[in-house]
Image (tube, helix red, strand yellow):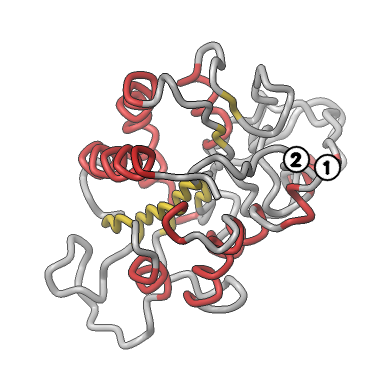
Amino acid sequence: MFAISGAQTMLNQQGTLKASFPGFIATLESEFADFDYHILSANTAGFWGYASCQGCQDTCADLPEFPCGVPPEPCDLVRGAGMTYPIGKGASNQRCELASGRRYITAGQPKLEDAFTCISSMGTNGAEGVAGATVLALAGDINAPGGCNEGFLREDALLVVVAIQDTFDQESPGDAEDWAAALVDAKGGDADAVVLLVITTDVEDPNGLCDYTGTITPHELRIWTELLPHSVFGSICANGYADYFAAAAAKIKSQCDVFVPQ
């Protein structure tokens, strides 16, 4: 599952992320062709709509391609639910065509790259708190029968979480220990069934790629990564994320090879 920040500062980073999608999808199709994967992009905002659409009659002033009269589905308004209609500047602004009929992609999806780009093009609507959105997306009620993400979590599947945010994430409830526990709990207490991939700022690291600030604020997203035994940390200031996703794919593949369903 992906949790992607929709902060206004994420415009360039989202562009870099989209540029890495073809290689990531190629890896999925080549390395994981025999796996029954699910791909969900969590709603980090918890709302649906766009300010310029309020009261208009035909199309949004700022998003002329987006029809104002399109009503939301109930799960479009739920934070943590799989995103199938991202709205905002730089977002998909259309209902994504998912063959599964669910709020996530399943193996065999036609035009996989297009579908993945659609659900993960969050835009810059101001939504942050990727860790909190992740916890909500993996909660029992939202994955239960009738829930927005019904069927996404499976006992016989490895859980891979990709969280992308250009700040420390001081908006999410709890702390890194709570977020790590939520991931492990989602897999019945088996930490070996979880792979956490985080792309975020590294301004607190004098050897990082972002401009070093020397901050003393705890970087909970980095701590979150360090708490899980199978994780990969990446700098959001990298010129591209192809190398990161290649390393992530190797990590996922190695865990798939040894994963034993409980």
Q: Residue at x 72, y 42 (%)?
A: 149
Q: Name the one closer to the observer, 29 or 257.
A: 257
Q: Is residue 129 among the parts visible in the rendering?
A: no
Q: Residue at x 39, y 33 (%)?
A: 18
Q: Name the one closer to the observer, 205 or 136.
A: 136
Q: Is there CB contact under 8 Å for labels 1 and 2? A: yes
Quick one: label 2, few (<14), some, or many (20+) residues within 10 Å?
A: some
Query: Quick check: 232 above or below 248?
Result: below
Tell me where residue 72 appears, x and y as whole percent: 83, 36
Tell me where residue 81 appears, x and y as whole percent: 70, 46
Q: Which mark is residue 145?
A: 1
The residue most toward the bottom is: 216
Tell me where residue 58 appears, x and y as whole percent: 82, 25
For residue 82, what is the image quadrant? top right
Q: Amino acid at mark 2?
A: Glu
Q: Is residue 89 left or right of residue 164?
A: right
Query: Quick check: 226 above or below 44?
Result: below
Tell me where residue 157 appears, x and y as whole percent: 53, 40
Q: In what element is the residue under mark 2?
A: loop
Q: Which residue is mark 2?
A: 150
